[in-house]
Amino acid sequence: MQDWDSWKEKIATINDSSLESEGGYVSNLLFRGQKCASWDLESTIERKGIDLPSVANFSNKIKKTKLAFESYLDTVWPSKFSGTDHQSPPENYEFMVYLRHHGYPTPLLDWSRSPYIASFFAFQYPSEDDEIAIYSFREYSGKGKSSCASNSTIIGCGPTIRTHKRHYVQQAEYTYCRKKISNVWHYSSHKEAFKATKNEQDLLQKFTLPAKLRSKVLSDLDAMNINAFTLYGSEEGLAEMLFNREYGYLL
């Protein structure tokens, strides 16, 4: 697509589309925005260049992180470390989401049920590419889902959890991938999982728009009250919103 209005028309089409569920479960349609169309769908821990750890290894690492946050916040985060490594959602998922919203890299890939919020994240910062990307994703389309333990499998975690308020403001949901290596569960990549996916599950579409539309898009979204302040609820978000309003979303 070459313009913002065309994308808004496409949004209406996507949201109005129905699925023949045959009585089966149909999961939420999710959206993700990325500022560079050339980027793969990667979690923040992958973007750091870190090899994806075993589920148990990552769980042990964030146990230490949890103590630091409890000390800083002078509160106690409910402990949900069960000792198992094959749960869905993963062990201590609520705390992982909290960490994700505060910049700590995790194996989670975050999505929004709002295509407009996903569009904001795609355009929030200037892109190194000529195009940005917005993805739509539906895990279950009413016909069930098959998987194999030795293959990377996408697992949606659902929206209802007790965590940071940004989760609800951003209409967020999360997916992660896992597979067994030498009989041990490891986090794995979405890229690998999508290569092996079937047409009746894990439905993914990619839409691209010119990065040069940034000023128009952010101005339009701001008029909808979608901006850094409303989505982050922080002083930094307020400063970003006010600067953008004053200087016109400079590239």
Image (cartoon, rainbow, N blue to C red):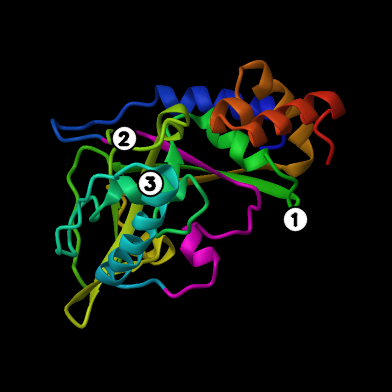
Left or right of 70: which side holds 146? left
Q: Nearer the viewer, mark 2 or mark 3?
A: 3
Where is residue 53? Give x, y as percent: 35, 72
Identify the residue at horizontal 44%, vertical 75% (top origin): 51
Q: Is residue 57 left or right of residue 126?
A: left
Left or right: residue 231 compared with residue 192: right
- Residue 189 visible to the viewer: yes
Q: In which quarter of the image is the C terminus?
A: top right
Indicate the quadrant where residue 5 lies.
Answer: top right
| Image point (66%, 53%), residue name | 36
Q: Which of marks 2 and 1 is in front?
A: 2
| Dot 3 alpha-carbon crowd within 10 angstroms: few under 14, some 14 to 19, many 20 or more | many
Q: Do the numbered discs 2 and 1 sit on residues whose CB atoms are within 8 Å?
A: no
Compare marks 2 and 1 and give the one earlier in the sequence: 1
**Residue type at the position of mark 2:** Pro
- Inspect the magenta stretch and tell me whether residue 198 lies in it: no
**Picture layout, residue 124 above or below residue 79:** above
Residue 42 can be seen in this image: no
- Amino acid carrying label 3: it is Val
- For the magenta stretch, what is the residue range? 27-51
